[in-house]
Image (cartoon, grey):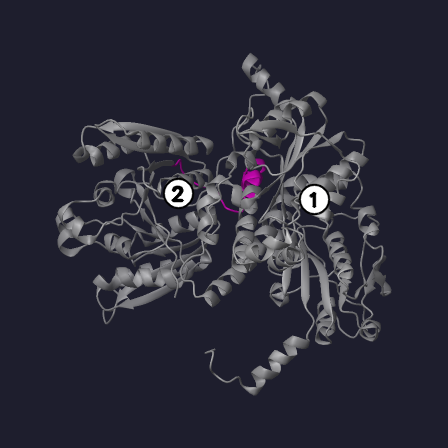
Amino acid sequence: MAPYKRKSPEEILYSIYQLQRGRLKIIIGSVSGSGKTYHMLEEGKLLKQQGIDVVISAVSTMGRTDTVQQLADLERVPSIHWWKDGKEEKDLPLEVLLERNPEVVLADGLAHRNREGARFPTRLEDIRYLMDHGISVITTINVYELAGVGERIYEMTGIRASETVPLNTLELADEVRLIDVSPETILKRMEEGVLGEGTHPALSRRGNLAVLRELSLRLMAEGVNDSLEKHREAEGLIGPSGATERILVSAQYHWNGSLYIRRGQQIAKRLNGDLLIITFVLRARPLTKDQQAFKRSILKLSERINAKFEELEVIRMRLLPSMLVRYAMQNNVTRIVMGHSQKSRWQEKWHGSIASRVLRRTRNIDVFLMADRAEQDGERILPIRSAPAGTEEPFHRLTGQELEQRIEHIRRGTFKVYIGAAPGVGKTYKMLQEGNLLLNRGIDVVVGLLETHGRLETKAQVGGLSMIPRAKIQYQSTELTEMDTEAIIARHPEVVLVDELAHTNVPGSRTKKRYEDVIRLLENGISVITTVNVQHLESLNDAVEQLTGVRVRETVPDAILRMANEVELIDVTPQMLQQRMREGKIYASEKVNQALESFFKIGNLIALRELALREIADDVDERLEAWERDSSLRGPWSRREVIFVCVDTGPQAERLIRRGFRIAHRLKAEWHVHYVQCARSRTPEEQKRLDTLRHLTERLGGVMDITEAVSRRHLHKHLLQRMNEMQTTQLIIGQSRKPLWRALFKESFVHYLLRHARHMDMLIVAVHTPIIE
């Protein structure tokens, strides 16, 4: 609505209704036993401490000790008990609750169906009734109790909920919070009998638990993405946020159109992105019979793969590139997939090519040019089911080296990482909480390094845990402290808790980074539980800067996360996080306003939350793929990929290396980073820059090659030759921003490859520049 337009009476009444209506918060989990009720009661206690009138009703603790303890000090309004198929059920006493009129009601089981004769048939309707009377509600639900998602879960795991709620129920909530728990934790709880009897047999399979967990994470990420897009629209920001992938395939009514769509589908699946398909037709020119046949085929394919399809009219083909780019920007596309040009150099100079024009017009959008391998070797890129991985010969005698590796793996400590979207979500709190639980079970647990940042709630969680004193290090006439890794190894506990994994050690320490200390502890047979924020992952460094405008300096290689036996996300809504900030529970009071106006802005927190949800969902899928290939949600990749990343010493080199790593990791591909030195000596600055790029590549598990070309004239040919020698299937290169007039006199490297590297896929990575409407 325009800001100066007068509101209608209906709009005024609705605004007043919204002011008087209660709020709804839904706590969602992947499975029963994930801790939803515990966290709901914990939130209730925190609200009560703030002076909010809170009551509980129809809460099911299942006799779990930790959850029962959370009931203390919370007023209970007795629920209506009844029996169904030999099982006790609890309904909400609506009239009693209305008479009591609390500010907040805590109630379990959003998908619960009421007894016959109740005022409403479902708990969802009960909750809406309470909200209409100004009472806020916090409630819980499992992901498989959402209609739509539940059907997919049943197909994949055999698990089906007896009662469900519509999928759009989550849209009714003011806040939705996910309680993320690893399959290993759920299985451990089952073994200890914490979950009680009557658990579905399919839940005892780790693969099924992983499927439920991944679907929960992705569902949450989609919801958070909707919030992020609304926020960006309100702020006048245009183009992709950088938190999620959105793939646009440009395909014509031609025999290769379906190939482009199939490739786009595979890219979208592997990158967990949305898929859009667009085709252009000339106005006032009817389709030929062949084109009509190809159109029917493309429409069927688009429907089958659940992609959005649009056909746009164009007056003349020269306008196609500008229309394509405009459409991509309007739909927040992150990558355009299209075919290579088939024109010669002189034809391109005279008529131009669609790819070249698209590259000139795009901002913040990558362009993927797909090779037509039918001309080379008749290859067709089609989804296929992967062959089962070969199993080791059971009678094979292990070599000395293999035996040593197996023994080293057995001796190695267990590694668990708590990850969050931002400081203050509760990672350290949860780590200490788990440490005390392990201590109570007779396991030798110590605190190796703790950073409470003055948070009283976190300090209180230390409990009976003993602390290893920090090592003192002299640095520039100042005494600083670091984790005493040697003392921990000498003490040799079963488990050590180590905060802030991404920390950089004081100069003069034995190791440069804390994660290197953690690796030493693991190698010495000591299990480690640690904490880190998603923005500290090396390969996400560019995405975080794009989302928040902040370049994070302290990072850890992605391989550290993959090395972990368990990774759990601590999910907190942006509203909760900002509230904690205002209450001084994250930073000191003098820093609160500055933080809320910079890194802790609501848009940043929403974007980081989505990034964290998607990153952990990808991690779950990687592990699921390793356990059970057929259960992977992203689907198989049907051919061997070799990624070749071209870099120079410019400021975009790190971005290209990180992009190359993330693509190679998702495609299970071999990847190379390449720099060509022309025949002259390097300056000290160039050598320092190359050392930095090599170090980054190696941190991400890649190899950087530096070769020499005879002269700058031969640089293009030299690189192309190296690509062909390595049998490159996908080239990654930065987008050129040289002015158009330069291209008329001297062919750029990108345009040279557009003509000579048509036998391989090319990903031309955009330079990110914020666009504000």
Residue 172 vertical position relative to residue 359 in the rendered view, above or below: below
Q: Residues within 10 Å of mark 2 (few under 14, many from 20)?
A: many
Provide residue 346's location: percent of width, then percent of height: 12, 49
Residue 304 placement, left or right of 651: right
Quarter the C terminus occupies: bottom left
Residue 422 placement, left or right of 90: left
Provide residue 66's location: percent of width, then percent of height: 80, 47
Provide residue 49's location: percent of width, then percent of height: 77, 59
- Which image quadrant for residue 236? bottom left
Q: Is residue 292 visible?
A: no
Looking at the image, tell me whether mark 1 or mark 2 is earlier in sequence order. Answer: 1
Residue type highlighted by circle 2: Arg
- Which image quadrant for residue 372? top left
Residue 18 placement, left or right of 383: right
Q: Tell me the element at label 2.
A: helix
Q: Nearer the viewer, residue 473 or 247?
A: 473
Residue 510 placement, left or right of 293: right
For the magenta stretch, what is the residue range? 621-641
Residue type highlighted by circle 1: Lys
Residue 434 painted magenta: no
| Residue on which the image places disc 1 | 430
Mark 1 and 2 residues: CB-CB less than 8 Å, in contact? no
Provide residue 430's location: percent of width, then percent of height: 70, 44
Q: Nearer the viewer, residue 149 or 496?
A: 496
- Which image quadrant for residue 329? bottom left
| Residue on which the image places disc 2 | 655
